[in-house]
Image: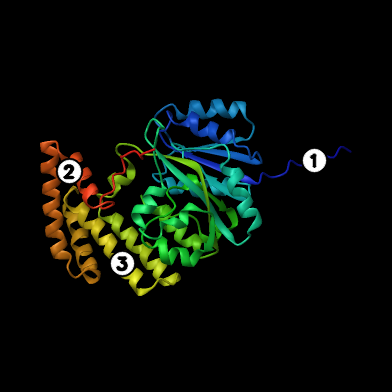
């Protein structure tokens, strides 16, 4: 009798959910296959892309036995459905959801795997992100975003840390999604499954909601090493979705979840709702209005008014600055005006397109 030795299961399952990103796939896939940490399997899912994504994926799969493929016959309509499907197929102990238009340094897994190995109570470890443009050229370190979003508290991201998940959600995640994107993170699979997975029906904030659920079950770790390169596009799904009022229902749901399951202070709860109210008012004059969106916005107005009694004044000011923004754009002085304002009041305005000064 011959005894066949079973191939050991991989430690890490890398999930690459793709839709219509053929031009970015080679760099994405190669940055995974060239990882210095090699105990991996790679699961590439394609959601009925109309471009030549599948040809590219199949070509890589033919050359590397670590790659497994899953091609949808019908478009799922949500990247979070793809997340969950990838985790179902995964055999590894840890999950890296490597979004198809991003790329990584070769030591991402080498930096993050030991953190989960040495700390069984850590459910997610993530590294520092570099924001790049569509061509892959550096724009800035995400540290600049932290500096703007969390003035006076952002130095924590300048060194490694491990923190209690509920505390992180209550003190930071309640205000913003502090994990820039999934490509920066390594997740413990058992913890992913314990949450019930990502929200399949959510269009935009499913990752934020998922992290909130995940952090209720353990600790969060951060490694201050630039390992993830997050590609931004001129018009992203996030920018488009922010103009849809139902997005704010998603965010209010996240805040309610953290309020009920974490331990945020009353001050943080009020502040978080006022921040979201400001996002909502900022979107109003750029939305495409229909009877349906008008109904949703009317309901949101009364919800936000409870948290921000001066909301009517905010709406008037928002309209004024919207008109001013359009006027300065028409005059061709908007960029110069923003730079002048930031010189007079440093850090007041944040320009996501502006490249960092070396």
Occupied quadrant, residue 155? bottom left
In front here: 319 or 345? Answer: 345
**Few, some or many residues within 10 Å of mark 2 (<14, 14–19, 20+):** some
Position of residue 3 relative to residue 245, above or below, is above
Asked whether, in this view, residue 352 is left or right of residue 101, the answer is left
Q: Position of residue 106 (x, y in %)?
A: 57, 36
Q: Position of residue 346 (x, y in %)?
A: 27, 51
Asked whether, in this view, residue 31 is left or right of residue 91, the answer is left
Q: CA distance from mark 3 to mark 2?
A: 29 Å
What numbered label is drawn on residue 5? 1
Residue lying farthest to the right in this orientation:
1
Q: CA distance from mark 1 to mark 3?
A: 58 Å
Position of residue 285 relative to residue 22, above or below, is below
Q: Going 65% across and 56% down the picture, which residue do you hit?
A: 118
Q: Determine which residue is flagged by label 3.
A: 271
Task: Please say whether residue 122 is visible from this viewpoint.
Answer: yes
Task: Give the position of the N terminus as an image quadrant.
Answer: top right
In front here: 150 or 45? Answer: 150
- Which secondary structure, mark 2? helix
Q: Determine which residue is flagged by label 2.
A: 337
Whichever of callouts 3 and 2 sits on the residue coming sooner in the sequence is 3
Whichever of callouts 1 and 3 sits on the residue coming sooner in the sequence is 1
């Amino acid at each position: 009798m011959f005894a066949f030795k079973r191939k050991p299961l991989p430690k890490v399952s890398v999930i690459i959910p793709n839709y219509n990103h053929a031009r970015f796939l080679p760099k994405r896939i190669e940055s995974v296959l060239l990882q210095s940490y090699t105990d991996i399997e790679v699961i590439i899912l394609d959601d009925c892309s109309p471009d030549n994504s599948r040809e590219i994926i199949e070509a890589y799969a033919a050359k590397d036995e670590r790659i497994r493929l899953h091609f949808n016959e019908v478009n799922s309509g949500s990247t979070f459905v793809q997340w969950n499907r990838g985790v179902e197929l995964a055999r590894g102990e840890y999950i890296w959801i490597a979004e198809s238009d991003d790329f990584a340094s070769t030591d991402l897994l080498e930096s993050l795997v030991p953190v989960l190995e040495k700390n069984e109570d850590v459910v997610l470890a993530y590294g520092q992100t570099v924001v790049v443009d569509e061509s892959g050229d550096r724009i800035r370190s995400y540290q600049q975003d932290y500096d703007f979003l969390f003035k006076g508290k952002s130095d924590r991201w300048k060194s490694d840390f491990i923190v209690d998940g509920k505390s992180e959600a209550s003190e930071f995640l309640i205000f913003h999604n502090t994990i820039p994107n999934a490509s920066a993170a390594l997740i413990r699979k058992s913890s992913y499954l314990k949450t019930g997975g990502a929200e399949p029906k959510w269009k935009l904030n499913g990752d934020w909601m998922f992290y909130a659920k995940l952090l209720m079950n353990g600790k969060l770790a951060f490694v201050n090493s630039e390992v993830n390169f997050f590609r931004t596009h001129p018009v992203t799904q996030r920018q488009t979705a922010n103009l849809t009022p139902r997005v704010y229902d998603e965010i209010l749901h996240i805040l309610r979840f953290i309020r009920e399951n974490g331990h945020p202070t009353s001050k943080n709860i009020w502040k978080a709702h006022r921040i979201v109210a400001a996002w909502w008012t900022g979107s109003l004059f750029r939305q495409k209005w229909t009877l349906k969106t008008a109904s949703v916005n009317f309901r949101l107005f009364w919800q936000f008014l409870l948290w921000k009694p001066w909301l009517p004044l905010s709406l008037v000011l928002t309209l004024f600055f919207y008109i001013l923004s359009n006027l300065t754009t028409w005059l061709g002085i908007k960029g110069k005006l923003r730079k002048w304002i930031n010189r007079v009041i440093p850090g007041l305005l944040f320009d996501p397109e502006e490249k960092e000064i070396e």
